[in-house]
């Protein structure tokens, strides 16, 4: 069964509540994006503090060893952009 995911810059972007996964689980790395806090702007609720982690998809590694990079951004757009930069860098180094 084929699944259609929302994509950003050609990579899958899957959201469940305040947690997003960006990238393909078939790649060596995927980004975990967690919205930690929100604020109201112009009457709309927007992500404020967002944690970004680049995780190795190798399930044989412990969770601690799977974290390749970690950062924080203000706003979901900045967080996804950071995740995209890291994925481009780490996946290119892997080839």
Image (cartoon, rainbow, N blue to C red):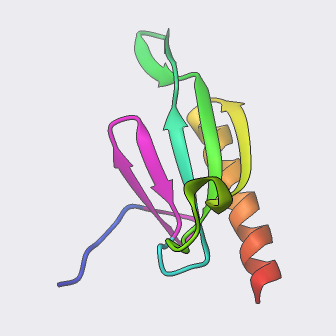
Residue at position x 57%, y 61% in the image: 62
Q: Is residue 18 magenta?
A: yes
**Residue 56: percent from the left, percent from the top?**
61, 67
> In the figure, is residue 38 to the left or right of 68?
left
Dominant secondary structure of the magenta stretch?
strand
**Is 88 placed above or below 67 here?**
below
Dividing the picture into quarters, in which one does residue 17 lie? top left
> In the figure, is residue 7 to the left or right of 79?
left
Which span of residues is magenta-colored?
Answer: 7-23
> In the figure, is residue 36 to the left or right of 65?
left
Q: Which one is in front, 3 or 21?
A: 21
Which quarter of the image is occupied by the C terminus? bottom right
**Is 9 placed above or below 38 here?**
below
Dividing the picture into quarters, in which one does residue 72 lie? top right
Residue at position x 68%, y 39% in the image: 78
Q: Is residue 26 magenta?
A: no
**Residue 42: percent from the left, percent from the top?**
48, 11
**Is 94 placed above or below 46 here?**
below
């Amino acid at each position: 069964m084929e699944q259609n995911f929302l994509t950003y810059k050609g990579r899958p972007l899957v959201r469940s509540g305040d947690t997003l996964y960006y990238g393909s689980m078939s790649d060596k790395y995927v980004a975990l994006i967690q919205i930690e806090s929100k604020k109201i702007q112009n009457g709309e609720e927007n992500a404020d503090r967002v944690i970004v982690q680049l995780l190795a998809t190798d399930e044989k590694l412990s969770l601690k060893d799977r974290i390749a990079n970690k950062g924080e951004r203000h706003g979901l757009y900045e967080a996804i952009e950071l995740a995209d930069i890291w994925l481009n860098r780490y996946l290119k180094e892997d080839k």
